[in-house]
Image: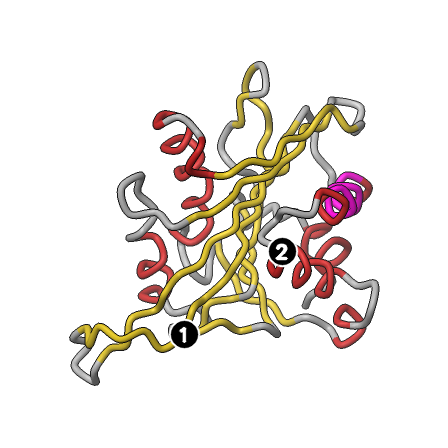
Amino acid sequence: MINREDMLELTRRMTPARTSITRIAGCYVDKDGEFDGSFNTNFLKLSGSDRAKNLKLAKTVPFSDTNKNLKKYEFRPESQKPGGMWQLLMAMRECGLKNDALMDTFYDVVMERCHMDSEYAILVFHDRYDIPAKAADKERLGESEEVFEYLICVICPLSGEYESGEPECGFLFPAFTDRSGDLNHVNVYQRKPDIPHMELIREILGVE
């Protein structure tokens, strides 16, 4: 189960003034499921309006209803072997999305297996959160205990000329559990939990 307070701790920082997101990368996919261009940029170099717009998209994942729209899944052992999605996500996280070859590999996997009815965008955000230590009474002690380095991915239908609409599905990797990074799990978002994109869970991420 996901602790709602863990997710709120992340979302409180997802404002233009407080964000520590370092980078955003993404690609566009046309209605036939074909690649239609990509981008990869320093998040702070975006205009103020673009930063706010993209933060809203990223925030959709951790701010959604926990254990309903957002659920925790475990990586199967085979998914953590060389060549698997877990290893790819770890490499993307380690390079802070700066390796375009890794990003292209990720986009290819998603495009090959994602079932969308229209043009869409695959957006990936990289963040580093310096987790402050807290006493038993939850008062902040100040000294950091851990840096939580993570990715948020959202898959969004396009609502206009390269304009991303509300995310249809996505994930946060690694999962954020008990205020710490949890490398064996991922938090998966579904806008419509009654009609989930099971291909994201089973075929793309390889989790259960």
Reading the image, the residue beneath label 2 is: 95
Helix, strand or loop under label 2: loop
The chief SS type of the magenta part is helix
- As drawn, the residue found furthest toward the top would be 161
Between marks 1 and 2, how big is the CA–CA gap? Answer: 18 Å
Which numbered mark, 1 or 2, is in the foreground of this view?
Answer: 2
**In this figure, which colouring scheme has been used for the structure?**
secondary structure
Near mark 1 (Cα within 10 A), the count class, few <14, some 14-19 or many ≥20, is: some
Reading the image, the residue beneath label 1 is: 146
Helix, strand or loop under label 1: strand
From which residue to which does the magenta span run?
A: 104-111
Estimate the x, y position of residue 47 in percent, counting from the top left.
40, 26
Estimate the x, y position of residue 66 in percent, counting from the top left.
42, 59
Task: Confirm whether the magenta stretch covers residue 105.
Answer: yes
In the picture, measured across the screen, residue 173 lies left or right of residue 119, that is left
Q: Residue at x 38, y 50 (%)?
A: 20
Q: Residue at x 36, y 25 (%)?
A: 49
Q: Earlier in the sequence, mark 1 or mark 2?
A: 2
Estimate the x, y position of residue 184 in percent, counting from the top left.
61, 74
Position of residue 136 relative to residue 115, above or below, is below
Q: Residue at x 54, y 54 (%)?
A: 151
Near mark 2 (Cα within 10 A), the count class, few <14, some 14-19 or many ≥20, is: few
Position of residue 10 relative to residue 56, above or below, is below
**Residue 136 has which mark?**
none
> Label 1 is placed on what type of residue?
Glu
> Label 2 is placed on what type of residue?
Cys
In the picture, measured across the screen, residue 155 lies left or right of residue 109, that is left
**Circles 1 and 2: CB distance less than 8 Å?**
no
Identify the image quadrant of the C terminus. Answer: bottom right
- The quarter of the displayed image where residue 142 is located: bottom left
Estimate the x, y position of residue 45 in percent, counting from the top left.
44, 32
